[in-house]
Image (tube, grey):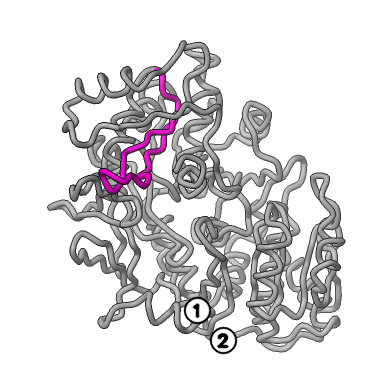
Amino acid sequence: MNDTAHALSASRTLWELLSRRADLTPGRPVLLQDERVLTFGELRGRAERVAAGLYGMGVRPGTVVAWQLPTRVESAVLSFALARLGAVQSPVIPFYRDREVGFALRESKAEYFAVPGEWRGFDHTEMAQRLDAKGVFEAYDRLPDGDPAVLPAPPSEGTSVRWIYWTSGTTSDPKGVLHTDRSLIAGGSCLAHALHLSASDVGSIAFPYAHIGGPDYMVMLLLYGFPAVMFEHFGLPDALEGYRRHGVTVAGGSTAFYSMFLAAQREQPGAPVVPTLRLLAGGGAPKPPELYHSVVREMGVQLTHGYGMTEVPMITMGSPDDSAENLATTEGRPPEGMEIRIVDGEVRLRGEAVCQGYLDPAQTAQAFDADGFLVTGDLGRLTADGHLVLTGRLKDVIIRKGENISAKEIEDLLHRHPAVRDVAVVGLPDAERGERVCAVAERVPGDGELSLDDVTSYLRSEGLSVHKLPEQLEVVDALPRNDTLRKVLKYKLRERYS
């Protein structure tokens, strides 16, 4: 991290961070979307006017404001306007519907709710009315506006809870995760420190801005003073024109994004899909080693992967100067200030980027151990040089006849099978074995049939122990995924095939 970025990372609040960056490089672009360009100075100026408009509506420091908005310039402006006021923000992924949205509004006790109106064929305003949401206002093309002279002083400290993020809710109701400005700045600083970016880079935000990755990425832009392209609708190959037009140098989001770029590259071998691209980076889901090697070999770019969660937006991150072995098989190293402790194989965390807990105090009490470490439920180990290797999740360990089997180990091997495009391995109830191993695979189109014998023979040839071999294979057109970072929803597979 350069000296300027290091100094900026000490900012107490997100608003202070934006103000300091706007003072340094007011005319430099920060957000690009289609033909629109917003500079750092304009972001600060617009956010102040929107904050004044919100103040006129009755929003005050500490007021809870939920917003369910797509990845747009207006979403970032509204978020920084709320940060200017010191309001408590509760971002909600725009793909969520009545059940998840109603839960978030009730649990957060939101006093205002910003929606995009009708978006992608769904009427969010009508949903808000069905849910009896308070203070509903549309914030898509037009935002509240006012004279900044009416505003009180901005918040002076960044350790109060001003953010309520929601876990993905893949197994139960989502949890409301409590963050501060400082925890978000610490998470974004980890990402920025690892990637070695500069003011000449151009990034991309192709995932929901309401995800915890939104502020993570914005902090990185503010620290280094470079722009990012925002994609309201992401899909390849359609989005490639935007990447090329803006000269994106850093792309990614999660493992699913890497796979999509790789598939696009395979449609035009020998010609880079994005000529300016030099780095894919992301996190949020396991990365098979074979995917790393395929990206580097076929796309000619570097791939760095990290480890984060809603509770801790960035824990470790691979760095472009890591060895190929570490980039392929580990999640990178933690930054200074992030403590990782392995207890009985489980990863536990302590540091400034760790959340303050959950809205439900009982969930908070269960989440932290006696030493204040967050209990993640992830399994892993640290290498001799401090890199973290994740080996699975506690719930992802299959217990077959009393023997523990890592689903991730089998998945990593099957990702190398030429007929497998993607795969998830789950344990299913079995009267004789306790659990049996089931592999659910997406087949590469046009590669013929894929049978259980094919899979087990391949795994035997790769040296997998016999007791770990799948006893069931299901072939699907597409694995079920969530709408944020495209994580596979294993609970749906267990429900379907149990």
Q: Amino acid at mark 2?
A: Ser
For the residues labelled 2 and 1, say whether their Cβ atoms are less than 8 Å apart: yes
Q: Nearer the viewer, residue 99 or 485?
A: 99
Q: Nearer the viewer, residue 456 or 378?
A: 456
Element type at mark 1: loop
Please say if 181 is above or below 490.
below
In the drawing, what numbered circle is on residue 12? 1
Q: Amino acid at mark 1?
A: Arg
- Does 438 lie within the magenta span? yes
Closer to the chain start, of discs 2 and 1, is 1
Q: Which residue is drawn at the image coordinates 40% and 28% (left, top)?
A: 295
Where is residue 119 shown, x and y percent of the image? Answer: 81, 50
Q: Nearer the viewer, residue 256 or 25?
A: 256
In this rendering, would 241 be left or right of 388? right
Tally the numbered discs: 2
The stretch of residues the image draws in magenta is: 419-440
